[in-house]
Image (tube, rainbow, N blue to C red):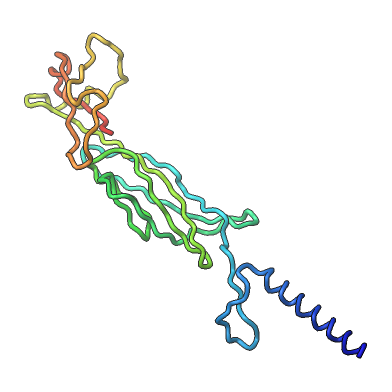
Amino acid sequence: MKTWRTLGSVGLLVSVLGVACNSGIIGGEDPNCTDPNGCNQTQGAEFVNLIVDPAQATLTSDNGSKPNQSFIIKGQRPDGSISDPLAAVYSVPSNGIGTIDSSTGVFTATGEVGGTVTITATVVSNGVTLTTTMQVTVVLVKTFTTPGTPADAPTKFAGTPTLDLAKSAQIVYPLNNVVMPQNVYPADIQWTNDESRREGCSKVPLW
């Protein structure tokens, strides 16, 4: 009788240790496992953080050009080591600023709308979804030349700017702090100044 109790205690101890070992692996035992050699355990995410390069970028669209920007996503492991570039799924809001290839991560500006857009990248690691974001700012630059302007007029604006309030252009449209709907084509800049009309050319960034 005493021997039976001793064996029972040992059996109970082994059972408890077995549960403790299983619970020590993230996710526990797969309830659908049928492998007689033991069940595979559900692993946690390999990465604790995603690193974006670059995290921010600025593109300049000159007279309707469509510049692009690529991104690289890497994972940071719990021990601090960094992975090779990872496959990710990229998305960007439909706001007219630009589009992105969902698999390659190449963002392309439309050349029609300026502004800042947030891109989202999603990586799946061991069944765990990780996301990160990056921002792209698109600056539109347009060159306006009025009829009758000399062909070499744009070259006269390549020098170092000189501040002369008496000759500064007065912006008449759009109004200061005006907000343009995104479904309206970007407004051209209109100004008044004898000197600027004589040259007839201006290169203005549009946001």
Residue at the image position 51 percent from the left and 51 percent from the top:
51
Q: Residue furthest top?
A: 166
Left or right of residue 152: residue 99: right
Above or below for 190 versus 97: above
Residue drawn 58% across and 72% down?
42
- Where residue 158 appears, as percent x and y from the top left, is 27, 25
Residue at image position (81%, 78%) is 13
Place residue 1 in its image quadrant: bottom right
**Residue projecting furthest to the front:** 1
* Location of residue 20 by image quarter: bottom right
Give 148 or 189, whichever is nearer the viewer. Answer: 189
Give the camera-side residue of 32 and 181: 32
Q: Is residue 153 above or below residue 120?
A: above
Give the total of numbered labels: 0
Give the percent coordinates (x, y) of residue 18: 73, 77
Q: Is residue 39 above or below residue 111?
A: below
Residue 144, placed above or below residue 19: above
Can you say which quadrant of the picture contains the C terminus? top left
Quarter-of-image position of residue 78:
bottom right
In the depicted view, which residue is nearer to us: 185 or 6?
A: 6
Q: Is residue 7 visible?
A: yes
Q: Outermost residue toward the left?
A: 148
Is residue 153 visible from the viewing direction of this image? no
> With 92 as the anchor, is 34 left or right in this view?
right
The residue sitting at 32% across, 48% down in the picture is 68
x and y, in percent, of residue 113 in the image: 24, 40
9 left or right, relative to 147 = right
